[in-house]
Image (cartoon, rainbow, N blue to C red):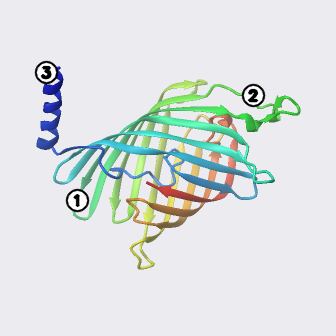
C-alpha cells in the first residue's frame, strides 16, 4: 500500500513540474476534414442513391504535456461508420458497419505566424455485414454478398503545417497486419482544409477540404474526397458542420473493399 501512495505522489509531482495535464479539454490535433477515417458524429445522405452513412464515435486526448510553445498529447480513438439503406415508413436497415479503435499521439508546435506538428495513430479496423443486408424472405444475403473477414492493423503518421486557417498535410500508413492479405503494405496520403471568416461572424466559418489517398491494393489507385460547407463554431473547437461532399475510389466499407464507388452527399456533423 505504501508503494502505491509513493507512486501516486510521484505522478502528482511530475504533473506539476512538467506541466502534465490529465484529461485536457478539446483536441490537440483536430480531425482532418475530408479524410474518411476520422471520428465524426453525424449523417451523410447520398444523392440519387437510397443510402446514408451514420458516424458515431469520438477521439479523446487523455494526457497532455505542455511547454511554452508546444503541446504533446496521448489519446484514444473509438468510432464507427455505418451504411444504412433508406426505405419507406422511415425505416433504415443497417447493411454494413465498420469499427475503428486505437491510440494516438499528437504533437503541435506554435509559432508566431503558423504552427506545425503531427498525429501518430496505431489502430485497428474491422468490418461486418448486418441484418439489413440479409433477405429474410429468400433466406439469403442480398446480391449473394456473403459476410467475409476484414481487418486492418496499421500505423499512420500524419504531419501537417497550418498557416492561419489553411492546413496542409501529408501522411504515410503502414499496414502491418491485414485480412485478407494485400500486396502493398503502404498507403500514401495528402490533403488540405481551409476555413475562412468571410461572413464577419465569430461563429460562422465557410470551409473547403480535399483528401487524396494513393493505395495500390484496389483497381482505383487514387481515392478522392472533397468537402465544402459551413461550420457554426470555431474551426478548432466544438460546433456543427453542414457540408456537401464528393467521394470517388474504393468503398470505405471493409465488406465492400474491392468495389468502386463514386457519389455525392449532403451531411451534418457535430464537432466535439
Which image quadrant: the C terminus?
Answer: bottom left
| 122 displayed left or right of 114 | right
| 254 displayed left or right of 63 | right
> Which residue is at a point 16% across and 37% down the rendered structure image?
12
| 169 displayed left or right of 79 | left
Circle 3 is placed at which residue position?
2
Residue 171 falls in image quadrant: top left
Rendering coords of residue 197 (x, y %)? 41, 73
Disc 1 to disc 3, C-alpha distance:
44 Å
> Which residue is at a point 46% across and 49% down the rendered structure image?
190
Which image quadrant: the N terminus?
Answer: top left
Q: Secondary structure at mark 3?
A: helix
> Which residue is at a point 63% across and 43% down the rendered structure image?
82
Rendering coords of residue 208 (x, y %)? 50, 64
Circles 1 and 3, Cβ within 8 Å, touching? The answer is no
| Mark 2 neighbour density, 10 Å: few (under 14) some (14–19) many (20 or more) | few
Circle 1 is placed at which residue position?
111
Residue 198 falls in image quadrant: bottom left
Q: Which mark is residue 146?
A: 2
Q: Nearer the viewer, mark 1 or mark 2?
A: 2
| Mark 1 neighbour density, 10 Å: few (under 14) some (14–19) many (20 or more) | few
Residue that sits furthest to the bottom in the current view: 200
Rendering coords of residue 122 (x, y %)? 41, 33
Q: Nearer the viewer, residue 73 or 42?
A: 42
Pick whichever of labels 1 and 2 is earlier in the sequence.
Answer: 1
Q: Nearer the viewer, residue 153 or 97?
A: 97
Amino acid at each position: 500500500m505504501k508503494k502505491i501512495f509513493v507512486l501516486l505522489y510521484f505522478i502528482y509531482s511530475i504533473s506539476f513540474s512538467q506541466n502534465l495535464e490529465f484529461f485536457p479539454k478539446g483536441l490537440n490535433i483536430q480531425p482532418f476534414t475530408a479524410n474518411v477515417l476520422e471520428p465524426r458524429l453525424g449523417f451523410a445522405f447520398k444523392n440519387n442513391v437510397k443510402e446514408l452513412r451514420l458516424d458515431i464515435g469520438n477521439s479523446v486526448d487523455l494526457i497532455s504535456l505542455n511547454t511554452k510553445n508546444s503541446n504533446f498529447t496521448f489519446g484514444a480513438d473509438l468510432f464507427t461508420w455505418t451504411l444504412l439503406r433508406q426505405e419507406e415508413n422511415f425505416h433504415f436497415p443497417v447493411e454494413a458497419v465498420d469499427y475503428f479503435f486505437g491510440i494516438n499521439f499528437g504533437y503541435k508546435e506554435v509559432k508566431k505566424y503558423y504552427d506545425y506538428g503531427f498525429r501518430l495513430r496505431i489502430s485497428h479496423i474491422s468490418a461486418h455485414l448486418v441484418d439489413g443486408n440479409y433477405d429474410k424472405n429468400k433466406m439469403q444475403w442480398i446480391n449473394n454478398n456473403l459476410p467475409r473477414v476484414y481487418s486492418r492493423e496499421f500505423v499512420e503518421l500524419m504531419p501537417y503545417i497550418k498557416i492561419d486557417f489553411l492546413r496542409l498535410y501529408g501522411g504515410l500508413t503502414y499496414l502491418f497486419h491485414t485480412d485478407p492479405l494485400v500486396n502493398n503494405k503502404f498507403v500514401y496520403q495528402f490533403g488540405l482544409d481551409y476555413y475562412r471568416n468571410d461572413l464577419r461572424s465569430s461563429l460562422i466559418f465557410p470551409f473547403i477540404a480535399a483528401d487524396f489517398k494513393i493505395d495500390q491494393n484496389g483497381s482505383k489507385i487514387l481515392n478522392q474526397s472533397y468537402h465544402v460547407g459551413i461550420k457554426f463554431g470555431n474551426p478548432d473547437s466544438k460546433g456543427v458542420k453542414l457540408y456537401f461532399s464528393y467521394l470517388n475510389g474504393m468503398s470505405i466499407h471493409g465488406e465492400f473493399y474491392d468495389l468502386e464507388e463514386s457519389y455525392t452527399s449532403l451531411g451534418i456533423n457535430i464537432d466535439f
